[in-house]
Amino acid sequence: MAASSVAESNQQLWDEALGRLLNLSSATLKRNAELESRVAELEVELAVWKQAHATALEGADREAKALKGRLAALNGQMDSLVNHSLLVLCVVDGDACIFNEALLRQGHEGGRQAAQQLTKAVAEYLTRENVHTLGHLSFWITVYYNRLGLINLLERHKLCTPEQFEAFVMGFSQTSPRFSLVDVGYGRDATFTKIAEYLQTYIRFPQTQRIFLAGSCDNTYVSTITALQNDDLLDKLAVLEKKGEDQGLSRRFSPPPLVTPPPLNVTGLSPRGSNGGLPTPHSPSILSVSTNGKLIDPTLPLHKHCPPPCNEYYLMSCTKGSTCKYSHEYVLTPEQLATLAANAKKAPCNFLKNGLQCPYGERCCWGHTCPNGPKCFHLSKD
């Protein structure tokens, strides 16, 4: 009896132990299954990241190779620009620097001689200043000027005829495809604005070796040159100045001046004094005139003179010549030119009045807009 109780007790203990083992085994198997599932998920995730990393590396490698190729190409272009297309530029204020009278009167041949003399002067300067360059040197000349205003001025001062001047311009520009004369038209400081922007742009090019400036002998370009000096770019600039004169720009700035070459006269007559007949702050107070010039009677209005001064002659360009019924002989001050221009604007332009487009545009000295609008007196007469 006692032995049977012990056996039953032992069997119960073994059953309980076996149950606990089975439960532990089941929990272990379940946990292992969960861990295996998590490991599988992590392996998938790792594989995705590895693929993304590999793709990113390939993309970065391709981009690096592309950038390296572009850098090599840009370096090649830079070397080509610097070593094989070196620029020497000459920019001329054609309103302030009038070409010599003798060359102007020679027409086409005079233009060729002027271009050749200017080129020779620049070449001699580069040699004298020991400017050494490697590769091809490209020399350019650009002249900015007010064509109609300059023709009017040259004719008024009997320096040359319009035909001679046009031939001169053609001869100059045909000397080289790199020589150009650009008509800026009428406008307040039109020539100065073009040249100032020209200097600010081209002097920064790495292939630009020198820029030669032929400007006015006053302070017109001082602000522009000062800005270049502040940017440490003045070593590329050479200024053309009149021989034997007090060289104002060279005294202010460091680059050596280039004495004005034979074809140019820095203190030439400047038409800058007219903007459709209106004087600007840069207007010279006195212009040289021919000995036949007549003074205006200050006690009479301009239109009361006999004959009155010709509006188109003084403000644009008169094509009537000796047949014009108005005078071309008066010596007008800037104030009188301003009065003449203001009065001319009160009369309508004949082109617009006849329904045509005015070929002179904003340069026309006659009125294009009536302050009375549709109630204009001249319109009511049609």
Image (cartoon, grey):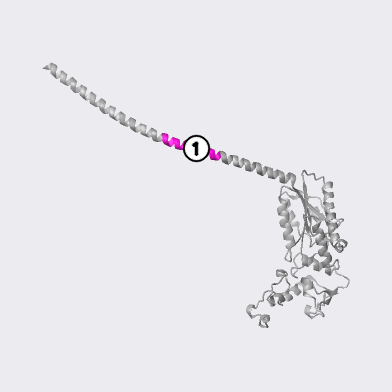
Q: Residues within 10 Å of mark 1 (few under 14, many from 20)?
A: few
In the picture, measured across the screen, residue 122 lies left or right of residue 275, that is right
* Most distant residue in the left direction: 1
User: From the image, which quarter does the C terminus lie in?
Assistant: bottom right
Query: Of helix, strand and loop, which one carries label 1?
Result: helix
Residue at image position (51%, 39%) is: 55
Q: Is residue 70 visible?
A: yes
**Front residue of this view, candidates 85 and 241:** 85
Which region shows up in magenta? 43-60
123 over 46 or under it: above or below: below
Q: Is residue 51 magenta?
A: yes
Q: Quadrant of residue 312?
A: bottom right
Q: Which residue is mark 1?
A: 53
Coordinates of residue 14 in the picture (x, y in percent): 21, 22
In the picture, measured across the screen, residue 103 lies left or right of residue 89, that is right
User: From the image, which quarter does the N terminus lie in?
Assistant: top left
Residue at image position (48%, 39%) is: 52
Coordinates of residue 54 in the picture (x, y in percent): 50, 37
> What's the residue type where badge 1 is placed?
His
Q: Is residue 117 magenta?
A: no
**Front residue of this view, candidates 162 and 17:** 162
Q: Is residue 97 visible?
A: no
* Most distant residue in the bottom direction: 381
Coordinates of residue 325 in the picture (x, y in percent): 81, 79
251 over 72 or under it: above or below: below
**Front residue of this view, candidates 99 and 342:** 99
| Prevailing secondary structure class for the magenta stretch in the rendered image | helix
Coordinates of residue 118 in the picture (x, y in percent): 83, 55
Q: Quadrant of residue 221?
A: bottom right
Residue at image position (77%, 71%) is: 315
